Image: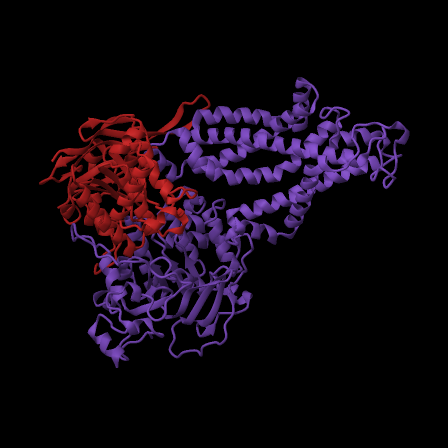
Amino acid sequence: MSAALKLTDLSKTFEVGRTLFGKPKGLVRAVQPVDLTVEQGETLGIVGESGCGKSTLARMLVGLLPVTTGSIEIEGAALDNADPAVFGKRIQYVFQDPISSLNPRKTIRQVMEAPLKNLHGMGKAERDARIREIFDTVSLREEFLERYPHEFSGGQAQRIGIARALAAEARILILDEPVSALDVSVQAQVLNLLARLKEELGLTYLFISHDLAVVEAVSDRVAVLYFGGVVEVGRAEDIFSRPKHPYTKLLADSAPVVGRALRAPEGVDTELPDPLNPPTGCAFRARCPNATERCGREVPKLVEMGEGHRAACFHPVG
Amino acid sequence: MSAFFRLLARNRLALWGGIVLVLVVFLALITPLLPLADPDVTDTANRFLPPFSEGAFLGTDHLGRDLLSRLMWGTRLSLAVGFSAAVAAATIGAAIGIVAGFYGGRTDNVIMRGVDMLMAFPYILLALAIVAALGPGLMNALIAVAAVNVPFFARNIRGITVGIAHKEFVDAARLAGMGNGRIILTEILPNVVPVIVIAMSTTIGWMILETAGLSFLGLGSQPPQADLGSMLGEARSALITNPHTSVVPGVMILVIVMSINLLGDGVRDALDPRLKSGALSRPMPATLVDRRSVPEAGKGDGILALQDLETQFHVKDRVYKAVGGVSLTVHPGECLGIIGESGSGKSVTALSVMSLVASPPGVITGGAVRYKGEDLIGAPYAKLRSLRGDRVAYIFQDPLATLHPLYKVGDQLVEAIGCHHDVSSAEARSRAIDLLKSVRIPNAESRVDSYPHEMSGGMRQRVGIAMALANEPDVIIADEPTTALDVTVQAQILALLDDLRKARGLAIVFITHDFGVVAQLCDRVAVMYAGRIVEEGPTGAVLATPAHPYTKRLIACVPELGEGRRELAAIPGLPPVVDKLPEGCAFAERCHKARNDCRRGNIPLEGPAEEARRVRCLYPENERMAEAVSS
């Protein structure tokens, strides 16, 4: 397998506030330098809590945000500061909120035609045929094409969002919380559709979610993000059942599971670290039961801890 | 479009404004075809003829010109100038606003500071300065009036554009390969046009007035050409001796501006999306009640009992049966879970308990809600108010929306206490600190003076819980209180609710869509589908051996942690719309076991007499339940 997506030292820093002369008052590191590789045909899950930088990472990958440092390689070719029109053919994005990602004043046909016209320069007849083909693939009825977004339920709108991403014929899809706005019964429909499309079209997914169970169910490998940095990467079947990083363990213990007694897995006075004033060393140490003096001095690096399993921790659990 | 006209016509004043305006515009349009005297021919022998004179219906002015003819031609000119000025100002202003709002950053800063400078001058001074620089004349007056109004449009449209430019569909368009120009034209502009129309409809009258003002001062239309302003200006010297020369153009200005403004307000109201849902019509303090009969009080009911509760939404001629006969009981110290997908009626059920469903359009059409045996549906408002937040408290999904952003959390807690108890402010404050401690907020003494935005989501939800606990209620109704929170925070909040329930003997009604949460927190669970309970029983039993096919398949849909990569079971299709509920079982359409009798009549919620489990299904999944149902 070759790498579909390779991130090297990718980071993002936001400027906070500005003085009169345009100098930033503070810097926030939304994404710490990240190295990740997604193999061809693989699904890499990315989990983390709100504010951990998952969406910033995703938006950088599709060129909606400029990167601060590092590089993105798509299928072997570097893509830096590229024109979104070129990006669009190689990597596409499926949004979290299916309704608000569709322009309320355009019919579904107009939405679907945009990538075909702008990215592939197709003529009218060709576009119609292609749209019919894509709609057939995602099991949408053709009569939907003349309707407006507000006429659809969340699940249908998300199918349209997926159809639009497919229209660009990109082989890599960034799925940013694609099912978290949907009901459980519909969520399963969309997840299964995504799995089928991947199989049929040979797609590569980067699946971002806060729902551990969903990520585990759809991913080959999972990366856990905390405070903008990757703290653990491993195979989906291992990472939550045999976590190495204490944060991954905390996440796994916190997820409500049928048949497990209710208890708060950590103390109440824990707060996320302040991004404007980041802690030294490991960002998790204030919440960590295993933290030692070394964790405050050095930033732990991702190290190999078993087959295909890496974690950034000096005192791994298990 | 027809909906727009219907909304507009409902506003009587706007309708009259519209009719008058159409009439005036029509007359102005056909003026050249009417057999009128030449408006510019002077006839000093017949000056200042009074109205209704022969040959001059409205009389003549100081040069003996026919007033009626001048009025018609003047109106025509004033309308044309005002309208062109409005269109010009709207086009230029909207273009500036869209560019500034879309590009943002430095572009935005430079453009908007320029606009601010323009706004810093008093408008009439600015208009005078422009006309002084360009020289008097109708065209220059038009330019001045348009220029003066550009900032209004620019600011308005910029604000709207900023909101739209960050919407996800704009990102999606960019990924579809569109450039900035095309995004502005095809994505942003169509969403901004209604705002431009609204802004124009409310300012066009103002612009006609401004043009008339400039003409009045002699800076607009030049003699002998008539417009309404110059007619007024010329008649000024004869105001006392021959008032009709001023009254005629004056009344016309009044009529035009009034009708345009009334219509403009109507257009704005009709186009405003918030009005469509009836949100601006003030909701009543308690939900409307329209029920035929009151069910008898049951025996051995808990602290809170719902009996066959029916809540509907009446929107125009449609009836949405959001809650179609729900019966539930909760005892002190017990946690009852209500689980269902969106649109299943779980939130409406919860809000109906304290008559909090917004009316209009909500109506409680049947059943009863008994708190300690007393029916609360249709209870006097004072009674409901004394119970709300005191005996029965709510926790909502979004704590940021529940808490007032401009008040400190401590003050909000004090207010919650003060509503129901006559306590001194010092006492209330110390009580507020105790409450924050009881929900385990660290540093409660200093946190009491924090504003909601200074807290994290988990902290805010704790404040929401503290507020619900403020008056030591008997029942807490929690509507998806942890859905917006991260898992680690959710675990803390659930543990907290569980402790509080055990320590205080609280009864909790917990609404959620998450089986994991129900399993961990709730003693009993009721599953809702399309406004009715389809299954009810002890949590462990329902989850282990679900009896209703919907429950069984819904559980199968939920991925559970620790099972690795797998295919998920899905339920095909969508839940029915509650204004078109099918006969019989609402789930039959999606159910693989459905037979003909599932689509007929009312299927009761029943179960074995000796057990607390009930199911609304003719062919339950579970054998024990199947026996009970068939017997």
Which of B410 and A53 lies nearest the eye of the viewer?
Answer: A53
Residue B52 at what x, y percent from top left? 86, 41
Residue B351 at what x, y percent from top left? 44, 62
Which of A6 and A227 lies nearest the eye of the viewer?
Answer: A6
Q: What colour do you see for chain A?
A: red
Tell me if residue A265 comes above or below residue B595 in the rendering: above
Tell me if residue B207 comes above or below residue B453 in the rendering: above
Q: What colour do you see for chain B?
A: purple
The residue located at (49%, 23%) in the rendering is B110
Residue B74 at what x, y percent from top left? 73, 33
For residue B350, which quarter of the picture?
bottom left
Specify the farthest residue to the right: B45
Where the N terminus of chain A falls, by quadrant? top left
In the image, taking residue A178 as reference, residue B153 lies left or right, namely: right
In the image, taking residue B370 as reference, residue A220 lies left or right, namely: left
The coloring applied to the image is by chain
